[in-house]
Amino acid sequence: MTEQPKGFDLADLLARRGGERYELHARYLNHQLPRMLRTIGFDKVYERAEGAYVYDTEGNDYLDMLAGFGVMGLGRHHPVVRKALHDVIDSSLADLTRFDCQPLPGLLAEKLLTQTPHLDRVYFGNSGAEAVEAALKFARYATGRPRVVYCAHAFHGLTAGALSVNGEAGFRDGFAPLLPDTAIAMGDLAALERELVRGDVAAFVVEPIQGKGVYPTPPGFLRAAQELLHKYKALLIVDEVQTGLGRTGDFYGFQYEAGVEPDLVCVAKALSGGYVPVGATLGRDWIFRKVYSSMDRVLVHSASFGGGAQAMAAGLAVLSVLEDEHIVANVRVTGELLRARLAALVDRYELLHAVRGRGLMIGIEFGRPDSIKLRSRWTVLQAARKGLFAQMVVVPLLRKHRILTQVSGDHMEVIKLVPPLIIGEREVDRFVAAFTAVMDDAHGSGGLMWDFGKTLVKQAVANR
């Protein structure tokens, strides 16, 4: 009998067990995920990835217009980030001793702050939700006030504090009681002032472009909100977890509007390089000095893996690539090309109602058609569940055209595009051609597409 070799062999483990991926998830993790993927035909087996593409076991390429919900800002496996991680592992640094000051966190903080010269200090955690949690805690402590105002339909994370400023009831249901927070409509300055005048508001937290539905803040809103907040001695928190690091064509999304200087800024996602989770909360010096007011409070807010060498190396590599490869400039050019070509289709297709966004964060919105035939089909879908038509578009984009996209939010007829920031004209051509073909199908006889719609209707009704 041959003795089996001992030790951990990742390649061997994946070769032996990788084919069980969907069964393992169904048995040990969120059992609804594989069920959902199989229902819509997304239960693919992806074997490898590079840049803006993922590849299945047969070698077929899939254009990734989702980028892991924005995590893969530089695409997958960028060589500079990979090398930085190999280097930091090979360096055998004395990491996370907790009782020293390693250089990499300070260097990454210094580099991040060059993009926000009005801010002074950085707290490092492990995710966007943690970055928001830190901002909420810091704002409450620094102002001595309990309440935070947020926007309807906002998404700032799913941990308890971040959930308190989540504007979607579907995420909040069943998790009450939450923290004392109040929602206003985006752009409603009068509503914001009504809350501020009560004197108990610590901060207003806002996304420059809401991820759910891809809704940019109205022109002038952030600047006006900032002035109101400071008038009433409250803080402006800008959530740049998805919009930051070049996504909108500026380094930060709030920079689109002149004169906006948030008191706290949250970043994450793309800062990781797609490898090591990292989140950061940037803030003013006086806020940090209040929170960390004495040596007794040195660990009053901290994270076990915050500032870890691998995460810091990944972040430094990402910022280097953004600068060296002129990524933000590419986002402006490519984003405008993609948005303009899609916007040109609005008058061509009655089911296509709007194209909006900035840079490479684009929302494609569908709506009620005028023609009787299409309107009757649309009505059936809407009666079953709002958002089914957008799902009907996402599915053939993957199945027929090998393009990965997402519906922008529950009960929304919006597709969100957040591709890697490195895409160019070739990827724009491929997406627009595929999207045009799907729209032609939806507006024509569209047998297969509308047959799939019937499947979605049955599934929606069964889930009620």
Image (cartoon, rainbow, N blue to C red):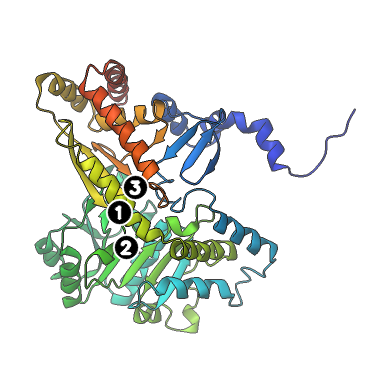
Q: Amino acid at mark 2?
A: Asp
Q: Nearer the viewer, mark 3 or mark 2?
A: 2
Residue tagged by mark 3? Answer: 175
Mark 2 and mark 1 in contact? Answer it, CB < 8 Å.
Answer: yes
Q: Quadrant of residue 185?
A: bottom left
| 204, above or below 60, in the image | below
Q: Secondary structure at mark 1?
A: loop
Residue at the image position 35 percent from the left and 47 percent from the top? 418
Residue tagged by mark 1? Answer: 359
Residue at the image position 61 percent from the left and 77 percent from the top? 100
Mark 3 and mark 2 in contact? Answer it, CB < 8 Å.
Answer: no
How far, Cα to Cα, is label 3 from label 2?
A: 36 Å
**Residue 435 x, y percent position in the rendering:** 30, 33
| 324, above or below 22, in the image | below
Q: Quadrant of residue 404?
A: top left
Q: Amino acid at mark 3?
A: Phe
Residue at the image position 9 percent from the left and 20 percent from the top? 372
Query: Mark 1 or mark 3, which is nearer the start of the sequence?
Result: 3
- Depth check: give the residue in front, 258 or 28: 258
Residue at the image position 40 percent from the left and 52 percent from the top? 421
Name the outermost residue toward the right.
1
Label placed on residue 250:
2
Query: Mark 2 or mark 3, which is nearer the start of the sequence?
Result: 3
How far, Cα to Cα, is label 2 from label 1?
A: 8 Å
Query: Is residue 212 among what the camera can see?
Result: no
Q: Nearer the viewer, mark 3 or mark 1?
A: 1
| 91, above or below 362, in the image | below
* 10 Å crowding of disc 3: few (<14), some (14-19), many (20+): few
